[in-house]
Amino acid sequence: MNTTALRDEADYAAVLANQFDAVVAENAMKFGPIHPEPDRYDFTGADAVVEAGEANGQVVRGHTLVWHQQLPAWLEGADLSREEAIAILRDHIATVVGRYRGRIAQWDVVNEALPDSGSGLRDTPWLRWIGPDYLDLAFQFAHEADPDALLFYNDYDPANTGEKSDRIFDLVAAMQARGVPIHGVGLQFHVYVPVDRAAVDAQIQRARDLGLRYAMTEVDVALPLPVTDALLHQQSVQMGTLLAACVAEPATCTTFVLWGFTDRHSWIPSFLPGLGAATPLDERLAPKPAWQALRHALDPDEPAPVAPLDEVPTLPPSVPGPVTPSTEPAPAVPLPGAPAYTG
Ligand code: XIL
Protein backbone atom coordinates (compact mmCIF):
# COMPACT_ATOMS: atom_id res chain seq x y z
CA MET A 1 0.00 0.00 0.00
CA ASN A 2 1.21 3.40 -1.00
CA THR A 3 -0.14 5.70 1.69
CA THR A 4 -0.11 8.82 -0.49
CA ALA A 5 -2.18 7.09 -3.14
CA LEU A 6 -4.48 5.72 -0.46
CA ARG A 7 -5.16 9.26 0.70
CA ASP A 8 -5.31 11.03 -2.67
CA GLU A 9 -6.71 8.56 -5.19
CA ALA A 10 -10.24 7.30 -4.65
CA ASP A 11 -9.99 4.67 -7.39
CA TYR A 12 -6.78 3.28 -5.87
CA ALA A 13 -8.38 3.11 -2.43
CA ALA A 14 -11.49 1.43 -3.83
CA VAL A 15 -9.55 -1.35 -5.57
CA LEU A 16 -7.51 -1.87 -2.45
CA ALA A 17 -10.62 -2.13 -0.31
CA ASN A 18 -12.55 -4.40 -2.66
CA GLN A 19 -10.03 -6.78 -4.17
CA PHE A 20 -7.72 -7.83 -1.35
CA ASP A 21 -8.01 -9.46 2.04
CA ALA A 22 -4.67 -8.34 3.39
CA VAL A 23 -2.64 -5.16 3.26
CA VAL A 24 0.94 -4.10 3.95
CA ALA A 25 2.62 -0.71 3.88
CA GLU A 26 5.20 -0.33 1.13
CA ASN A 27 7.24 2.12 3.21
CA ALA A 28 5.30 3.62 6.13
CA MET A 29 6.43 1.13 8.79
CA LYS A 30 10.12 1.10 7.91
CA PHE A 31 12.54 2.46 10.49
CA GLY A 32 13.22 5.80 8.77
CA PRO A 33 9.63 6.88 8.17
CA ILE A 34 8.25 5.63 11.48
CA HIS A 35 11.10 6.64 13.80
CA PRO A 36 12.61 9.76 12.22
CA GLU A 37 14.37 11.07 15.33
CA PRO A 38 15.77 9.32 18.40
CA ASP A 39 12.90 10.39 20.62
CA ARG A 40 10.19 10.85 18.03
CA TYR A 41 8.02 8.36 16.21
CA ASP A 42 5.72 9.30 13.32
CA PHE A 43 2.81 6.91 13.05
CA THR A 44 0.83 8.90 10.48
CA GLY A 45 1.33 6.53 7.56
CA ALA A 46 1.36 3.36 9.65
CA ASP A 47 -1.89 4.29 11.37
CA ALA A 48 -3.51 4.99 7.99
CA VAL A 49 -2.56 1.53 6.76
CA VAL A 50 -3.80 -0.25 9.88
CA GLU A 51 -7.02 1.77 10.00
CA ALA A 52 -7.75 1.17 6.31
CA GLY A 53 -7.09 -2.53 6.71
CA GLU A 54 -9.36 -2.78 9.72
CA ALA A 55 -12.10 -0.76 8.02
CA ASN A 56 -11.96 -3.19 5.10
CA GLY A 57 -11.82 -6.33 7.27
CA GLN A 58 -8.32 -7.10 6.00
CA VAL A 59 -5.41 -8.81 7.68
CA VAL A 60 -2.63 -6.29 8.27
CA ARG A 61 1.03 -7.24 7.76
CA GLY A 62 3.88 -5.23 9.19
CA HIS A 63 6.99 -4.53 7.10
CA THR A 64 9.69 -4.25 8.42
CA LEU A 65 11.41 -3.80 11.79
CA VAL A 66 15.09 -4.43 11.06
CA TRP A 67 16.69 -3.68 7.69
CA HIS A 68 19.89 -2.08 6.48
CA GLN A 69 18.01 0.26 4.14
CA GLN A 70 15.71 3.20 4.80
CA LEU A 71 17.29 3.88 8.15
CA PRO A 72 16.71 7.36 9.62
CA ALA A 73 19.49 9.92 9.28
CA TRP A 74 20.22 9.70 13.00
CA LEU A 75 21.11 6.01 12.68
CA GLU A 76 22.78 6.06 9.26
CA GLY A 77 26.50 5.97 9.93
CA ALA A 78 26.06 6.20 13.71
CA ASP A 79 28.87 4.96 15.89
CA LEU A 80 27.07 2.86 18.50
CA SER A 81 28.21 0.40 21.10
CA ARG A 82 26.54 -3.00 21.18
CA GLU A 83 24.60 -2.02 24.30
CA GLU A 84 23.44 1.27 22.78
CA ALA A 85 22.27 -0.45 19.60
CA ILE A 86 20.44 -3.16 21.54
CA ALA A 87 18.67 -0.50 23.58
CA ILE A 88 17.59 1.29 20.38
CA LEU A 89 16.41 -1.94 18.81
CA ARG A 90 14.47 -2.92 21.93
CA ASP A 91 12.81 0.48 22.24
CA HIS A 92 11.94 0.59 18.54
CA ILE A 93 10.41 -2.86 18.40
CA ALA A 94 8.58 -2.55 21.71
CA THR A 95 7.11 0.78 20.61
CA VAL A 96 6.11 -0.12 17.06
CA VAL A 97 4.95 -3.70 17.59
CA GLY A 98 3.42 -2.75 20.94
CA ARG A 99 1.36 0.06 19.39
CA TYR A 100 -0.31 -2.38 17.01
CA ARG A 101 -0.45 -5.36 19.36
CA GLY A 102 -3.35 -7.59 18.36
CA ARG A 103 -3.91 -5.56 15.18
CA ILE A 104 -0.94 -6.53 13.01
CA ALA A 105 -1.12 -10.27 12.48
CA GLN A 106 2.24 -10.84 10.78
CA TRP A 107 5.53 -8.96 11.03
CA ASP A 108 8.55 -9.09 8.75
CA VAL A 109 10.89 -8.80 11.72
CA VAL A 110 14.22 -8.89 9.90
CA ASN A 111 14.60 -8.13 6.22
CA GLU A 112 17.44 -9.15 3.87
CA ALA A 113 20.06 -10.20 6.43
CA LEU A 114 21.88 -12.49 3.99
CA PRO A 115 24.36 -11.54 1.26
CA ASP A 116 23.69 -12.57 -2.33
CA SER A 117 26.71 -14.85 -2.32
CA GLY A 118 29.10 -16.23 0.22
CA SER A 119 28.46 -17.45 3.70
CA GLY A 120 27.52 -15.64 6.86
CA LEU A 121 25.37 -12.56 7.31
CA ARG A 122 25.17 -9.48 5.10
CA ASP A 123 27.46 -6.68 6.28
CA THR A 124 24.91 -4.25 7.75
CA PRO A 125 24.94 -1.58 10.45
CA TRP A 126 22.97 -3.90 12.74
CA LEU A 127 25.55 -6.66 12.36
CA ARG A 128 28.41 -4.24 12.99
CA TRP A 129 26.78 -2.66 16.04
CA ILE A 130 25.37 -5.73 17.73
CA GLY A 131 26.88 -8.86 16.20
CA PRO A 132 25.16 -11.86 14.65
CA ASP A 133 22.65 -12.28 17.46
CA TYR A 134 20.81 -9.12 16.36
CA LEU A 135 18.35 -11.36 14.54
CA ASP A 136 17.55 -13.46 17.60
CA LEU A 137 17.19 -10.33 19.71
CA ALA A 138 14.84 -8.68 17.22
CA PHE A 139 12.55 -11.72 17.19
CA GLN A 140 12.59 -11.93 20.98
CA PHE A 141 11.71 -8.25 21.34
CA ALA A 142 8.90 -8.58 18.78
CA HIS A 143 7.51 -11.65 20.52
CA GLU A 144 7.55 -9.87 23.86
CA ALA A 145 5.70 -6.91 22.35
CA ASP A 146 2.98 -9.04 20.74
CA PRO A 147 2.98 -12.74 21.68
CA ASP A 148 0.20 -13.47 19.17
CA ALA A 149 1.83 -11.93 16.09
CA LEU A 150 3.36 -14.29 13.56
CA LEU A 151 7.00 -13.38 13.08
CA PHE A 152 8.72 -13.80 9.71
CA TYR A 153 12.23 -13.63 8.39
CA ASN A 154 12.00 -12.02 4.93
CA ASP A 155 14.54 -12.09 2.10
CA TYR A 156 14.92 -12.37 -1.65
CA ASP A 157 16.78 -14.76 -3.87
CA PRO A 158 17.85 -13.23 -7.20
CA ALA A 159 17.44 -16.66 -8.79
CA ASN A 160 14.04 -17.10 -7.05
CA THR A 161 14.85 -20.56 -5.82
CA GLY A 162 18.59 -20.94 -6.07
CA GLU A 163 21.49 -21.33 -3.71
CA LYS A 164 20.52 -18.28 -1.65
CA SER A 165 17.16 -19.85 -0.87
CA ASP A 166 18.98 -22.72 0.80
CA ARG A 167 20.88 -20.26 2.97
CA ILE A 168 17.62 -18.51 3.89
CA PHE A 169 16.17 -21.80 5.09
CA ASP A 170 19.39 -22.75 6.88
CA LEU A 171 19.27 -19.43 8.71
CA VAL A 172 15.68 -19.81 9.90
CA ALA A 173 16.17 -23.48 10.79
CA ALA A 174 19.14 -22.54 12.97
CA MET A 175 17.11 -19.81 14.66
CA GLN A 176 14.33 -22.28 15.33
CA ALA A 177 16.81 -24.75 16.77
CA ARG A 178 18.00 -22.04 19.15
CA GLY A 179 14.45 -21.56 20.37
CA VAL A 180 13.98 -18.16 18.72
CA PRO A 181 10.29 -17.27 18.33
CA ILE A 182 10.10 -17.39 14.53
CA HIS A 183 6.97 -18.57 12.77
CA GLY A 184 7.58 -18.14 9.09
CA VAL A 185 9.87 -17.41 6.21
CA GLY A 186 9.00 -14.83 3.58
CA LEU A 187 10.36 -14.88 0.04
CA GLN A 188 10.02 -11.59 -1.79
CA PHE A 189 9.70 -12.84 -5.38
CA HIS A 190 10.66 -9.77 -7.30
CA VAL A 191 10.84 -11.96 -10.37
CA TYR A 192 13.49 -11.36 -13.03
CA VAL A 193 14.03 -14.93 -14.18
CA PRO A 194 11.29 -17.48 -14.87
CA VAL A 195 9.81 -19.15 -11.84
CA ASP A 196 10.42 -22.89 -11.52
CA ARG A 197 7.25 -24.39 -10.01
CA ALA A 198 9.01 -27.55 -8.79
CA ALA A 199 11.61 -25.45 -6.98
CA VAL A 200 8.92 -23.30 -5.38
CA ASP A 201 7.06 -26.42 -4.28
CA ALA A 202 10.27 -27.74 -2.74
CA GLN A 203 10.73 -24.50 -0.80
CA ILE A 204 7.20 -24.63 0.56
CA GLN A 205 7.79 -28.26 1.50
CA ARG A 206 10.91 -27.28 3.37
CA ALA A 207 8.97 -24.68 5.35
CA ARG A 208 6.29 -27.26 6.07
CA ASP A 209 8.88 -29.78 7.28
CA LEU A 210 10.22 -27.14 9.68
CA GLY A 211 6.71 -26.41 10.92
CA LEU A 212 7.03 -22.86 9.58
CA ARG A 213 4.70 -20.77 7.51
CA TYR A 214 5.77 -19.70 4.06
CA ALA A 215 4.91 -16.30 2.63
CA MET A 216 5.30 -14.85 -0.84
CA THR A 217 5.79 -11.33 0.38
CA GLU A 218 6.65 -9.00 -2.51
CA VAL A 219 5.54 -10.41 -5.80
CA ASP A 220 6.10 -8.43 -8.97
CA VAL A 221 7.37 -9.35 -12.42
CA ALA A 222 9.35 -6.54 -14.04
CA LEU A 223 9.15 -6.35 -17.84
CA PRO A 224 11.33 -4.51 -20.33
CA LEU A 225 9.52 -1.48 -21.71
CA PRO A 226 7.64 -1.08 -23.91
CA VAL A 227 5.72 -4.24 -23.15
CA THR A 228 4.38 -6.62 -25.77
CA ASP A 229 1.46 -9.02 -25.59
CA ALA A 230 3.94 -11.88 -25.43
CA LEU A 231 5.70 -10.35 -22.42
CA LEU A 232 2.42 -9.64 -20.65
CA HIS A 233 1.49 -13.26 -21.17
CA GLN A 234 4.82 -14.42 -19.77
CA GLN A 235 4.22 -12.21 -16.77
CA SER A 236 0.82 -13.78 -16.22
CA VAL A 237 2.39 -17.24 -16.30
CA GLN A 238 4.96 -16.25 -13.68
CA MET A 239 2.44 -14.71 -11.30
CA GLY A 240 -0.07 -17.49 -11.81
CA THR A 241 2.61 -20.11 -11.17
CA LEU A 242 3.54 -18.51 -7.87
CA LEU A 243 0.01 -18.15 -6.59
CA ALA A 244 -0.94 -21.66 -7.73
CA ALA A 245 2.00 -23.09 -5.76
CA CYS A 246 0.86 -21.15 -2.71
CA VAL A 247 -2.79 -22.14 -3.05
CA ALA A 248 -1.79 -25.81 -3.34
CA GLU A 249 -0.32 -25.72 0.20
CA PRO A 250 -2.80 -23.56 2.10
CA ALA A 251 -1.74 -24.68 5.56
CA THR A 252 1.85 -23.57 4.95
CA CYS A 253 1.66 -20.83 2.34
CA THR A 254 -0.69 -18.49 4.13
CA THR A 255 0.40 -15.21 2.61
CA PHE A 256 0.64 -13.90 -0.93
CA VAL A 257 1.49 -10.21 -1.27
CA LEU A 258 1.88 -8.13 -4.41
CA TRP A 259 4.51 -5.37 -4.19
CA GLY A 260 2.16 -2.83 -5.66
CA PHE A 261 -1.02 -3.85 -7.44
CA THR A 262 -1.06 -1.21 -10.18
CA ASP A 263 1.59 -0.01 -12.61
CA ARG A 264 0.57 3.50 -11.56
CA HIS A 265 2.50 2.95 -8.33
CA SER A 266 5.35 0.49 -8.53
CA TRP A 267 8.92 0.83 -7.33
CA ILE A 268 10.35 -0.96 -10.38
CA PRO A 269 10.69 1.85 -12.98
CA SER A 270 12.60 4.13 -10.64
CA PHE A 271 14.85 1.38 -9.26
CA LEU A 272 15.48 -0.46 -12.53
CA PRO A 273 15.29 2.05 -15.39
CA GLY A 274 14.00 0.47 -18.57
CA LEU A 275 11.87 -2.03 -16.69
CA GLY A 276 8.33 -1.64 -15.44
CA ALA A 277 4.75 -2.77 -15.93
CA ALA A 278 5.49 -5.17 -13.07
CA THR A 279 2.06 -5.44 -11.45
CA PRO A 280 -1.22 -7.09 -12.49
CA LEU A 281 -3.27 -3.90 -13.05
CA ASP A 282 -2.25 -1.24 -15.52
CA GLU A 283 -1.95 2.48 -14.76
CA ARG A 284 -5.68 2.98 -15.22
CA LEU A 285 -6.32 0.02 -12.86
CA ALA A 286 -7.52 -2.12 -15.77
CA PRO A 287 -6.71 -5.83 -15.44
CA LYS A 288 -3.74 -7.21 -17.33
CA PRO A 289 -3.36 -10.90 -18.19
CA ALA A 290 -1.55 -11.35 -14.86
CA TRP A 291 -4.70 -10.31 -13.01
CA GLN A 292 -6.64 -12.99 -14.83
CA ALA A 293 -3.92 -15.51 -14.01
CA LEU A 294 -4.21 -14.67 -10.32
CA ARG A 295 -8.00 -15.10 -10.47
CA HIS A 296 -7.54 -18.43 -12.22
CA ALA A 297 -5.06 -19.60 -9.58
CA LEU A 298 -7.59 -18.78 -6.87
CA ASP A 299 -10.58 -20.24 -8.69
CA PRO A 300 -10.21 -22.82 -11.47
CA ASP A 301 -13.62 -21.79 -12.83
CA GLU A 302 -12.08 -18.49 -13.82
CA PRO A 303 -10.57 -18.84 -17.30
CA ALA A 304 -6.80 -18.76 -17.61
CA PRO A 305 -5.41 -15.96 -19.73
CA VAL A 306 -5.09 -16.82 -23.40
CA ALA A 307 -1.69 -16.71 -25.03
CA PRO A 308 -1.50 -14.06 -27.75
CA LEU A 309 -1.68 -15.17 -31.36
CA ASP A 310 1.40 -14.87 -33.50
CA GLU A 311 1.75 -11.43 -34.92
CA VAL A 312 0.59 -11.21 -38.47
CA PRO A 313 3.75 -10.97 -40.52
CA THR A 314 4.23 -7.73 -42.40
CA LEU A 315 4.18 -8.71 -46.04
CA PRO A 316 6.00 -6.92 -48.78
CA PRO A 317 3.54 -4.89 -50.89
CA SER A 318 4.04 -7.13 -53.93
CA VAL A 319 2.38 -10.10 -52.25
CA PRO A 320 -1.32 -10.00 -53.05
CA GLY A 321 -4.27 -11.47 -51.26
CA PRO A 322 -5.59 -11.70 -47.71
CA VAL A 323 -3.41 -13.08 -44.97
CA THR A 324 -4.84 -15.58 -42.53
CA PRO A 325 -3.43 -15.05 -39.06
CA SER A 326 -2.02 -18.13 -37.43
CA THR A 327 -4.16 -19.59 -34.70
CA GLU A 328 -1.21 -21.27 -33.05
CA PRO A 329 -0.36 -19.83 -29.64
CA ALA A 330 2.76 -17.76 -29.57
CA PRO A 331 5.83 -19.63 -28.39
CA ALA A 332 6.81 -18.92 -24.83
CA VAL A 333 9.12 -15.95 -24.67
CA PRO A 334 11.69 -16.23 -21.89
CA LEU A 335 11.91 -13.16 -19.73
CA PRO A 336 14.97 -11.34 -20.99
CA GLY A 337 17.93 -11.07 -18.70
CA ALA A 338 17.50 -8.03 -16.52
CA PRO A 339 19.58 -6.45 -13.83
CA ALA A 340 18.29 -7.98 -10.63
CA TYR A 341 17.59 -6.18 -7.41
CA THR A 342 20.56 -6.48 -5.11
CA GLY A 343 19.17 -5.34 -1.81
C1 XIL B 1 10.97 -0.55 -1.73
C2 XIL B 1 9.77 0.36 -1.95
O1 XIL B 1 8.89 -0.27 -2.85
C3 XIL B 1 10.24 1.70 -2.48
O2 XIL B 1 9.15 2.61 -2.56
C4 XIL B 1 11.32 2.26 -1.57
O3 XIL B 1 11.81 3.47 -2.11
C5 XIL B 1 12.45 1.27 -1.40
O4 XIL B 1 11.93 0.05 -0.91
N1 XIL B 1 12.64 -5.28 -0.78
C6 XIL B 1 11.90 -4.86 0.29
C7 XIL B 1 11.02 -3.68 0.17
O5 XIL B 1 11.87 -5.53 1.32
O6 XIL B 1 10.88 -2.98 1.36
C8 XIL B 1 11.49 -2.74 -0.90
O7 XIL B 1 10.52 -1.71 -1.08
C9 XIL B 1 11.72 -3.49 -2.20
C10 XIL B 1 12.76 -4.57 -2.02
Image: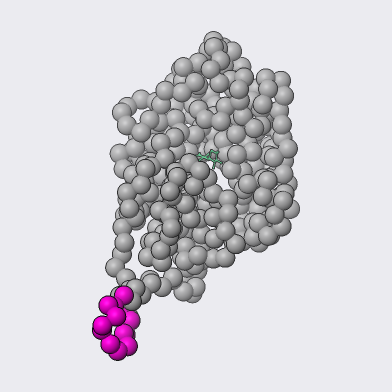
Q: Residue at x 60, y 46 (%)?
A: 24
Q: Residue at x 32, y 27 (%)?
A: 119
Taking depth in this image into account, of 324 and 96 the one nearest to the observer is 324
Q: Picture quarter containing residue 44?
A: top right
Q: Dividing the image into 4 quarters, which one contains the C terminus?
A: top left
The image position of residue 174, as x and y in percent, is: 39, 30
The image position of residue 342, as x and y in percent, is: 41, 36
Taking depth in this image into account, of 288 and 165 the one nearest to the observer is 288
Q: Picture quarter containing residue 246?
A: bottom left
- Overall secondary structure of the magenta stretch? loop
Taking depth in this image into account, of 154 and 288 the one nearest to the observer is 288
Which contiguous range is marked in magenta? 314-326
* Outermost residue to the bottom: 321
Taking depth in this image into account, of 154 and 8 the one nearest to the observer is 8
Q: Is residue 323 magenta?
A: yes
Q: Is residue 323 visible?
A: yes
Q: Is residue 15 left or right of residue 203?
A: right
Q: Is residue 242 left or right of residue 140?
A: left
108 relative to 243, above or below: above
45 relative to 253, above or below: above
The image position of residue 338, as x and y in percent, is: 35, 47
The image position of residue 127, as x and y in percent, is: 46, 20
Q: Is residue 34 left or right of residue 243?
A: right
User: Colour scheme in the image?
Assistant: one colour
Q: Is residue 218 visible?
A: no
144 relative to 159, above or below: above
* Outermost residue to the front: 318
Q: Is residue 160 magenta?
A: no
